[in-house]
Image: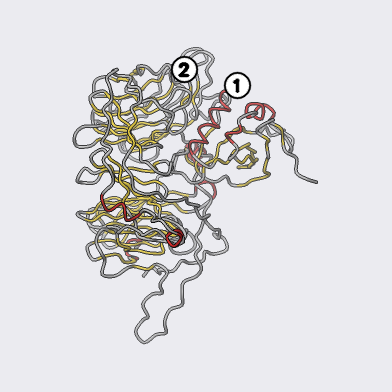
């Protein structure tokens, strides 16, 4: 049986996860609607309803008089009830056909089953899984299928530079480890360096895109993973002159339901420097497509993409259906670029605006929705309409569609719904006396809605159904019959393995930018004059922390950034200011930091430490 207590890791694995700071709440109010310029047509964009708040909203307003000023505002009633309390700050919910598997923590996690009977710690969810040195010393990446009938599970064993990924299949009453399929040596080296730039299924194997290890210059190649009987790896279309390939690399790869493989990137022009991260050049964007099992490709240049001079990290493909695909290029100087494929041709449907596009989905009426920092963009009848919540200006972190067609969204300290073209705040119960809850995930299960909300460094699972019993992960286990009561759990702590280094995403909490790899003969106090010159005057980057890190004997100049959008700004600034620079926005934690480097962004000069 899995213990509910948080266990202190062994000395070889010990470290703590940092708590995430959160912000303030806001009262309920209707959505703002903006009408950005529409590229497809010049027609007027319809405006959304600005219906007033519900009549009972007045109960949340302050009353006059000194007594009211010293009291808390009345909290509006919430449709949610606590179901699981005192979860670790890292918390995930995985919806499976028969139940919801909730995982409290990253490494050394606690497995929870949520079903029609309520919530309970369920050690059988981890039956057969082998940790590193002690039970549960692993990170569950995903679960599919319907255990205990059938299922697949992927986990990561902690270790240096990403650890080891291991896969299991459900057999009988426990998980059984699948036969290992070692990566080819070139792929393994790229993996541990955080340099697998794209990957996608190809037949029954994994296709990896890496830089050709035989060359000192940049040239993307495909390498097939081990096992299976897939057709030979496809070939990336060859370029001419200095362009080794027709594209500078692929920002993303996806397999369609037809079995075709697609990838997109910038067309290489003479003089461009190939790069997978932060591609820059004079060429337009293009999609390279390989028919199922084919080694050769067809390239389609994307209309209207000539203005995209920089392809920033976070740009990706969104496959919404067999004949419904989006290419999203995150905004730089050009604004967000979006192209749509209808199964026959590509069209430019860019919404404009400088905000990142974090997700995309369609509603039952056929409308296309983009999740952006400021709100939601809807595309119907070749027109865009923007819906922006009022109140605090925290960016939207996520948006999901429930079975009834209602859009739910989350941002710092607010759970929102968009109904009849109006954003409304859904009140949450008080989770912490000093901090409002921030919804980090939502799952829809039949007629029940589950929300995971973080407050005070802990996560609470809330349900629209009032439970008969609340699962308290800080409570001791029930005493065994005839035995002494078990001790209180140990202080909250969690293993933080050497981080998995992956491309940066808006949801990543540990973002950094690799700016420069130092030559082996570079002096210990090298001060990066070209990069500092490019940063001079960019005081908007004042939240960035610069440092020199070390990985496998090589030193790197990196910048730790507080947000994805600031990371994008830094990448763009260095690309434009340093010739042939290819900064990489990544997610994870460098293995070792040698020194902090303080830069005065007003002057670009190094700030010397006081003697």
The residue lying at 68 percent from left, 40 percent from top is: 597
- In the structure shown, which secondary structural element does the residue marked by tag 1 occupy? loop
331 is higher (above) or lower (below) than 96 = above
- Rendering coords of residue 108 (x, y %): 45, 61
| Quadrant (top left/top right/bottom left/bottom right) for the N terminus | bottom left
142 is higher (above) or lower (below) than 345 = below
| Residue nearest the observer in this picture, 466 or 53 | 53
310 to the left or right of 446: right
| Residue nearest the observer in this picture, 302 or 474 | 474
- Rendering coords of residue 467 (x, y %): 26, 66
| Residue nearest the observer in this picture, 73 or 604 | 73
- In the structure shown, which secondary structural element does the residue marked by tag 2 occupy? loop
Choose the circle earlier in sequence order: 1 or 2.
2
Q: Is residue 201 visible?
A: no
Which image quarter: residue 480? bottom left
Q: Residues within 10 Å of mark 2 (few under 14, many from 20)?
A: many
The residue lying at 33 percent from left, 27 percent from top is: 35
The residue tagged 1 is: 579
- Rendering coords of residue 78 (x, y %): 30, 58
Instruction: Tell which tag, 1 or 2, sits nearer the viewer.
Output: 1
Q: Residues within 10 Å of mark 1 (few under 14, many from 20)?
A: few
- Rendering coords of residue 141 (x, y %): 39, 50
375 is higher (above) or lower (below) than 481 = above
Q: Is residue 405 visible?
A: yes
Residue at the farthest right position: 611
Residue at the farthest bottom position: 482
115 to the left or right of 528: left
204 is higher (above) or lower (below) than 343 = below
Report the Cα–Cα distance between label 1 and label 2.
16 Å
The residue tagged 2 is: 268
């Amino acid at each position: 049986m899995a213990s509910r207590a948080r266990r202190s890791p062994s000395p070889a694995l010990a470290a703590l996860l940092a708590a995430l700071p959160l912000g303030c709440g806001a009262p309920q109010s209707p959505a703002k609607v903006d009408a950005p310029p529409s590229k497809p047509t010049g027609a007027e964009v319809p405006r959304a309803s600005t219906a007033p708040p519900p009549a009972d909203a007045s109960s949340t307003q302050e009353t006059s008089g000194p007594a009211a000023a010293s009291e808390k505002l009345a909290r509006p009633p919430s449709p949610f009830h606590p179901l699981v309390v005192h979860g670790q700050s890292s918390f995930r919910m995985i919806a499976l056909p028969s139940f919801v598997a909730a995982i409290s923590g990253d490494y050394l996690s606690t497995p929870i089953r949520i079903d029609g009977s309520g919530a309970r710690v369920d050690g059988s969810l981890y039956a057969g899984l082998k940790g590193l040195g002690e039970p549960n010393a692993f990170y569950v990446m995903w679960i599919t299928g319907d255990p205990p009938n059938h299922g697949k599970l992927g986990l990561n064993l902690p270790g240096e530079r990403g650890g080891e990924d291991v896969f299991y299949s459900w057999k009988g009453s426990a998980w059984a480890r699948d036969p290992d399929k070692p990566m080819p040596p070139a792929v393994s080296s790229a993996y541990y360096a955080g340099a697998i730039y794209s990957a996608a299924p190809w037949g029954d194997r994994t296709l990896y895109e890496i830089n050709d290890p035989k060359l000192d210059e940049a040239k993307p190649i495909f390498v097939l993973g081990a096992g299976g009987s897939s057709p030979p790896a496809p070939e990336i279309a060859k370029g001419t002159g200095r362009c080794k390939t027709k594209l500078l690399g692929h920002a993303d790869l996806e397999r369609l339901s037809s079995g075709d493989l697609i990838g997109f990137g910038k067309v290489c022009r003479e003089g461009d420097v190939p790069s997978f991260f932060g591609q820059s050049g004079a060429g337009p964007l293009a999609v390279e497509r390989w028919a199922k099992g084919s080694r050769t490709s067809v390239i389609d240049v994307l209309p209207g993409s000539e203005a995209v001079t920089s392809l920033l990290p976070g740009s990706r493909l969104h496959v919404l259906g067999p004949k419904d695909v989006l290419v999203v290029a995150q905004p730089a100087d050009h604004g967000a670029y979006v192209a749509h494929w209808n199964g026959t041709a590509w069209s430019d449907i860019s919404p404009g605006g400088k905000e990142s596009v974090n997700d995309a989905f369609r509603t039952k009426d056929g409308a296309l929705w983009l999740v952006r920092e400021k709100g939601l963009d809807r595309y119907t009848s070749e027109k865009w309409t923007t819906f922006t919540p009022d109140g605090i200006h925290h960016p939207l972190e996520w948006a999901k569609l429930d079975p009834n067609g209602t859009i739910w969204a989350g941002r710092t300290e607010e759970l929102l719904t968009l109904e009849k073209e109006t954003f409304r705040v859904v009140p949450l119960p008080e989770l912490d006396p000093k901090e409002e809850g921030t919804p980090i995930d939502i799952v829809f299960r039949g007629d029940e809605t589950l929300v995971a909300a973080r407050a005070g460094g802990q996560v609470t699972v809330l349900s629209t159904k009032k439970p008969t019993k609340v699962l308290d992960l800080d409570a001791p286990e029930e005493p065994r019959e005839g035995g002494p009561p078990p001790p209180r759990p140990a202080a909250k702590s969690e293993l933080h393995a050497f981080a998995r280094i992956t491309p940066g995403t808006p949801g990543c909490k540990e973002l950094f930018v690799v700016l420069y790899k130092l030559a082996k003969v570079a002096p210990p106090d090298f001060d990066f004059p070209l990069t500092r010159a490019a940063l001079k005057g960019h005081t908007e980057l004042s939240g960035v922390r610069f440092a020199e890190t070390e990985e496998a004997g090589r030193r790197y100049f990196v910048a730790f950034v507080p947000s994805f959008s600031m990371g994008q700004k830094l990448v763009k600034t260095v690309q434009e200011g340093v010739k042939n620079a290819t900064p990489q926005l990544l997610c994870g934690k460098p293995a070792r930091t040698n020194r902090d480097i303080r830069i005065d962004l007003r002057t670009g000069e190094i700030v010397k430490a006081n003697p």
